[in-house]
Image: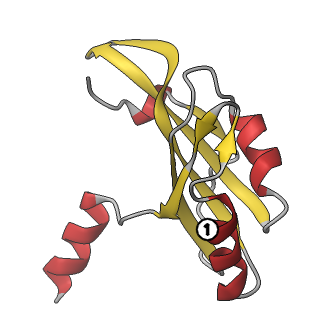
Amino acid sequence: MEVDVGENDVFGCEQRDDMVVRLYVGGLGSTVKPEELQRRFEQFGRVECVEVVKKKFHEDVTVGDCRGFAYINLKVFRDADIERCISTLNYCRWKGRELRVARAKPHFSSWAVHESKV
């Protein structure tokens, strides 16, 4: 299976630079909605973007089921806020499943651009 970012459920994904941390959230059920994740994470900061990654069976056919993970852009005021979010939600049970929450790794294309400038 491949990830098709263009067809995923996305909530408010605009680019912002200041104090926004991108989180990886794993262990999600197949029916999770972006709005549910927004409500779960908004106690820790302003949710700027929720991207629920969907299953893709063929290059042009995406189904509505979540692949079990999502990315969230969370705007926080202090680094301690993001650490509190991760320590509170990582390994917690939500909707009958155990969440995995961590800072997202940089996207390969962003990393490649950065490395080419070094």
Going by the image, does 50 lie left or right of 113? Answer: right
Where residue 83 appears, as percent x and y from the top left, is 63, 78
SS class of the residue under badge 1? helix
Residue 67 or 50: which is nearer the viewer? 67
> In the image, what residue occupies the spot 59% across and 76% down?
17
Compared to residue 46, the image places residue 95 above or below, namely: above
Q: How many marks?
A: 1
Image-quadrant location for residue 15? bottom right
Residue nearer the viewer, 16 or 99: 99
Q: Position of residue 89 (x, y in %)?
A: 66, 58
**Where in the figure is residue 117, as x and y percent of width and height?**
19, 84
Q: Residues within 10 Å of mark 1 (few under 14, many from 20)?
A: some
Q: Which residue is mark 1?
A: 86
Q: Quadrant of the C terminus?
A: bottom left
* Residue at (78% x, 48% y) in the render: 40
Quarter of the image where the N terminus is located: top left
Residue at (17, 79) in percent of width and height? 115
Query: What is the image's colouring?
Result: secondary structure
Q: Quadrant of residue 5?
A: top left
22 up-or-down from 32: above or below = below
Residue at horizontal 69%, vertical 86%?
A: 80
Give the percent coordinates (x, y) of residue 36.
77, 36
Q: Amino acid at mark 1?
A: Ile
